[in-house]
Amino acid sequence: MLKIEQAIYDAIVAHARADHPDEACGVVAGPIGSDRPTRFIPMTNAERSPTFFRFDPLEQFKVWREMDDRDEEPVVIYHSHTATEAYPSRTDIAYASEPNAHYVVVSTRDPEEVEFRSFRIVDGEVTEEEVRVVASYDADEPAANRARD
């Protein structure tokens, strides 16, 4: 299960919508071993394409080095699909190289609907997982429940 704060969830969706009609991409870093995404890092889609994304190699090197310096790892690796469902493509699966990461795909095909799904991809095997959006990790309550209080 991916547990993610509402603010980070909203930032991922906003980045996906802002880059539409091109695919957006980025990372949410977190402390090594915590499985807690805390630092939103939008990145540049070097392909600037509506059907494919690729991190800019220099930017990726910088981001991964910064994560190392901060004792972080990529907890979430996200990108958007602009015309298809939020499910990893064959290319997404082939390029998935972080076995501990949650791979999030956001579809921007419908401007009125948010399609936000998370997957584990290990050795080409895709497993969808539940996404639990919380107001904050400290409160550990679903954001929807907090909004009603």
Image (cartoon, helix red, strand yellow):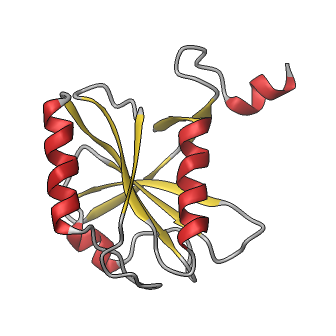
Q: Which residue is at 53% across, 56% downward?
A: 117
Position in image of residue 94 (x %, y %): 22, 73
Image location of residue 108, percent across then percent down = 61, 71
Which image quadrant is residue 60 in? bottom left
**Which is more toward the observer, 14 or 122?**
14
Residue 72 percent across, percent down from the top left: 23, 32
**Left/right of residue 111 with respect to residue 83 in the rendered view:** right
Please state, as top left, top right, bottom left or bottom right, where the C terminus lies in the image.
top right
Q: Residue drawn 58% across and 23% down?
A: 136
x 53%, y 44%: residue: 130
Quick check: 7 above or below 123?
Answer: above
Residue 80 shown left or right of residue 98 in the figure: right
Question: Within the image, what quadrant is residue 97 found in?
Answer: bottom left
Residue 39 location, x and y as percent? 39, 36
Q: Examine the rendering and report whether any part of residue 131 can be seen.
A: yes
* Relative side of 19 to 78, left or right: right
Residue at image x 51%, y 36%? Answer: 4
Q: Quadrant of residue 75?
A: top left
In the displayed structure, 45 sits above or below 84; it is above
Foreground pick, 22 / 130:
22
